[in-house]
């Protein structure tokens, strides 16, 4: 279990009224923005269960849009985000659903950008903490508490150790490494959380050496 | 190993002859690899945000998101213009500051969750009122919020401070214990008194359910904040007098965890019972949510 900080208890400084339904929603939006890493043209947002039922009252919809636009949890813009100039840049739709199989605060995104479309699922798990659970059919667990590399590799032996070598060579500690692939021979998606910050050159080197199908460097959202 | 119980906290303070905030800031800097100064700077920022939230709340009468509040702080202020509290100025401030912060939260204003957004008025109203009335300097202000945070962290290491898991006792109850202990710190109490203030405060709030009307953090949450702020100071004053909680603080936390686990989920932030299912609440719900699920398209 990750150690709790006193700062987790006396913050975040945030726009109210709910850490899970408002601050969590902004963080989900921010995380999705970082994973998508391209200008968002159109997005369909499907809110589930409690997020659907009480989301509007808690500003969950506003929070998500504000996050997608890059505003932080304590931004005073969140309240009026739908009337802001920034929000006119994205075409967004909301849908509201009930599902026993989903987390009470779950949300799905279908996002179109200039040259890519992605489906991403996320949930707000309490106290403003969030998780991205799925990226395009691949199960993941990204909580944005440390910087994370998301990388999808063609299943070729040695690629993972190549990556870890590059990271360690740059004096960065790997906090955790998780890989999964559906069957042998298929692409494997790995999540590599690190202590510290990786610079773009390192990401480029990984790209060159392993030729991944997908790579993103997602910065942490917590102090 | 970090400190997870009040017993450990007491031992550590006594053995090293350090105050709670000193132990806490050393621990934070070691575990999270930041300097004590950086940590204190972040705490100071939180105090700043708390003060701003109070100021904004005191100056607003805008309706809250769920339209069930937003006007009560103004009423209380107006009342105190013409009458004095039967207690004193500090008491007036605490009630107004707690209302101001909670209303600001429900308006989607900027607040500091402490430990949660629903309970965000309790710690700031107590602390900032005391800061003002007793002229507390900046360093001591920071020390007091660190003390509050340490108390909250110990409770949170056993009980999730979320209404959906532990009921409101875990949110507003924890906030109240934090405020009681921090107040005791501000009046230079010893470690036993500080911990005892937390125990007394928590003990009296066990069983508090979370049944917000229509799912908004408004009813009962907004008005609950001033109640629990005052509640914290009752615990503080009794602890100052040397009144001891017969059940030690750590065991009170255990009791809180058990009570939260036994509490029906209908009374834990699901708005399926209690105040949320009263006749009036249901009428309001019907009026507002005729279309429960809907789609809208904004181009
Ligand atoms: S009643 Fe529930 S939502 Fe309201 S402050 Fe308490 S725990 Fe939070």
Image (cartoon, helix red, strand yellow):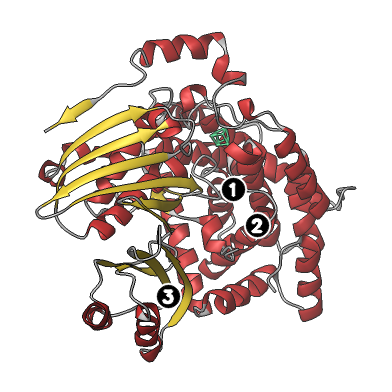
Circle on res. B126: 1
Residue at coordinates 38% horizontally, 32% vertically from top-left? Answer: A55
Which one is earlier in the sequence, the residue at label 1 or at label 2? 1
Q: Which residue is mark 2?
A: B182
Image quadrant assignment for residue A72: bottom left
Q: Please rate how many residues cluster around mark 2, counting C-alpha atoms within 10 Å: few if below 14, some from 14 to 19, many from 20.
A: many
Q: CA distance from mark 1 to mark 3?
A: 40 Å
Figure quarter occupied by ligand 1: top right
Q: Secondary structure at mark 2?
A: helix
The residue singled out by tag 3 in the image is A194
Q: CA distance from mark 1 to mark 2?
A: 9 Å
Around disc 1, counting alpha carbons within 10 Å, would you say few (fewer than 14), some (14 to 19), or many (20 or more)? many
How many numbered callouts?
Answer: 3
Give the x, y percent position of residue A21.
42, 40
Residue under the image location 16 percent in, 42 percent down:
A84
Looking at the image, which residue sits at the far right? B246
């Amino acid at each position: 279990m990750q150690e709790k900080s006193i700062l987790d208890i006396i913050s975040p400084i945030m726009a109210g009224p709910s850490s899970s339904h408002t601050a969590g929603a902004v963080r989900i939006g921010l995380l999705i923005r970082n994973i998508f890493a391209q200008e968002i043209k159109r997005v369909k947002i499907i809110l589930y269960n409690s997020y659907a039922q009480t989301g509007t009252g808690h500003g969950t919809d506003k929070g998500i849009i504000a996050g997608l636009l890059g505003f932080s949890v304590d931004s005073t813009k969140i309240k009026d985000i739908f009337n802001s100039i920034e929000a006119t840049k994205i075409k967004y739709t909301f849908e509201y659903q009930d599902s026993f199989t989903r987390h009470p605060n779950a949300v799905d995104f279908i996002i179109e950008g200039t040259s890519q479309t992605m489906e991403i699922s996320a949930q707000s798990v309490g106290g403003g903490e969030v998780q991205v659970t799925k990226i395009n059919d691949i199960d993941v667990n990204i909580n944005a508490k440390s910087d994370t590399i998301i990388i999808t590799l063609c299943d070729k032996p040695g690629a993972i150790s190549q990556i870890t070598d590059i990271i360690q060579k740059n004096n960065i500690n790997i906090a955790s490494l998780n890989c999964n692939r559906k069957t042998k021979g298929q692409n494997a998606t790995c999540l590599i959380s690190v202590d510290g910050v990786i610079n773009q050159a390192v990401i480029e080197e990984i790209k060159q050496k392993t030729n991944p199908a997908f790579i993103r460097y997602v910065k942490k959202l917590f102090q | 190993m970090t400190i997870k119980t009040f017993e450990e906290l007491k031992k550590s303070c006594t053995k090293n002859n350090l105050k709670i905030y000193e132990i806490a800031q050393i621990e934070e800097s070691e575990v999270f690899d930041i300097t004590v100064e950086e940590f204190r700077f972040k705490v100071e920022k939180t105090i700043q945000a708390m003060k701003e939230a109070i100021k904004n709340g005191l100056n607003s009468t805008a309706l809250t998101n769920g339209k069930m509040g937003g006007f009560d702080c103004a009423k209380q202020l107006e009342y105190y213009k013409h009458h004095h509290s039967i207690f004193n100025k500090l008491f007036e401030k605490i009630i107004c500051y707690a209302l101001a912060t909670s209303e600001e939260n429900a308006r989607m204003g900027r607040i500091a969750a402490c430990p949660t957004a629903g309970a965000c008025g309790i710690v700031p109203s107590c602390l900032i009122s005391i800061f003002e009335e007793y002229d507390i300097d900046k360093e001591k202000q920071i020390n007091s919020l660190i003390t509050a945070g340490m108390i909250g962290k110990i409770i949170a290491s056993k009980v999730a401070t979320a209404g959906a898991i532990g009921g409101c006792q875990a949110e507003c109850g924890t906030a109240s214990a934090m405020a009681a202990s921090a107040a005791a710190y501000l009046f230079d109490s010893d470690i036993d008194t500080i911990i005892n203030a937390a125990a007394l405060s928590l003990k009296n709030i066990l069983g508090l359910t979370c049944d917000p009307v229509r799912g908004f953090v408004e009813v009962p949450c907004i008005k609950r904040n001033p109640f629990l702020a005052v509640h914290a100071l009752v615990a503080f004053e009794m602890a100052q007098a040397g009144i001891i909680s017969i059940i030690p603080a750590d065991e009170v936390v255990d009791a809180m965890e058990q009570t939260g686990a036994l509490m029906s989920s209908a009374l834990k932030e699901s708005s399926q019972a209690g105040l949320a299912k009263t006749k009036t609440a249901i009428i309001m719900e019907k009026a507002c949510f005729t279309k429960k699920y809907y789609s809208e398209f904004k181009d």
